[in-house]
Image: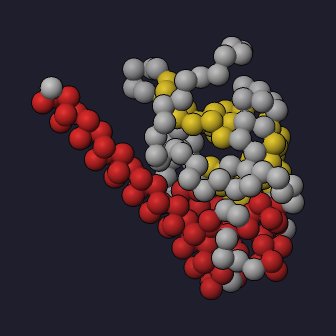
Amino acid sequence: MNEEQPRVIHSSFWANLFKSPTDKSDLENVLKMIPPFAELNKRDISMLTSFIHIRQYVPGEYIFHQGDPGIGLYVIREGEVLIQRALQSGETIPLAIFKKGDFFGELALVDNEERSASAIAQTDCRLAVVFKPDLDDFIEKYPKKGIKILQGISHIIVTRLRQLNEDHIALQSKLLNARED
């Protein structure tokens, strides 16, 4: 495997705008810092941890492939994960590198769509995973708490969409200025 880090294209969609602190090793504290779970109380978070799965990956191992069914949200406890997208031409574009405290895959908790990119362990990784069926059961048992979780996911989506809009306007402005020069 090539030791060189891939050049990542910075995109607002893939930017982790919700970075949780990495100095807290306690899973409950980390979950409390992530928007889908931020409004839950300590007891609710404790219930969530009962169905969180810990997975380990070695460098170069795929966590999921682009096109796979989206089945869960991943929180990086240790290591680095590359998110990349394959183009129709066969080329791949690195989109983001996530590190300890970051999370990805949250859209899988809402929709039943395929993964829009692949996630690959860049180092030895330990990830906490919230699988959609487990979360769906939790939401069904505790609908008021489920609403808070879905509002947190909506917050992520809205924040990223607003940032993408700003990036789009900035790019359009840059292109317009380049034409005028």
Residue under the point 62% across and 67% down: 36
Nearer to us in this view, 114 or 29 = 29
Q: Position of residue 47 (x, y in %)?
A: 81, 74
User: In the picture, residue 125 is in which quadrant?
Assistant: top right
Residue 73 versus residue 137 in the image, above or below: above
Relative to 38, 153 lies left or right: left
Relative to 47, 98 lies left or right: left
Q: Position of residue 71 (x, y in %)?
A: 63, 53
Q: Is residue 66 visible?
A: no
Residue most extreme to the right: 26
Residue most extreme to the top: 2
Q: Is residue 27 visible?
A: yes
Residue most extreme to the left: 180
Nearer to us in this view, 152 or 10 = 10
Residue under the point 58% across and 79% down: 147
Q: Position of residue 69 (x, y in %)?
A: 57, 48
Residue under the point 36% across and 45% down: 167
Residue 26 versus residue 86 in the image, above or below: below
Q: Position of residue 15 (x, y in %)?
A: 53, 45
Which quadrant is the C terminus positioned in? Answer: top left
User: In the picture, residue 97 is in which quadrant?
Assistant: top right
Relative to 22, 26 lies left or right: right
Q: How is the image coloured?
A: secondary structure
Which quadrant is the N terminus positioned in? Answer: top right
Residue under the point 74% across and 55% down: 21
Residue 140 versus residue 165 in the image, above or below: below
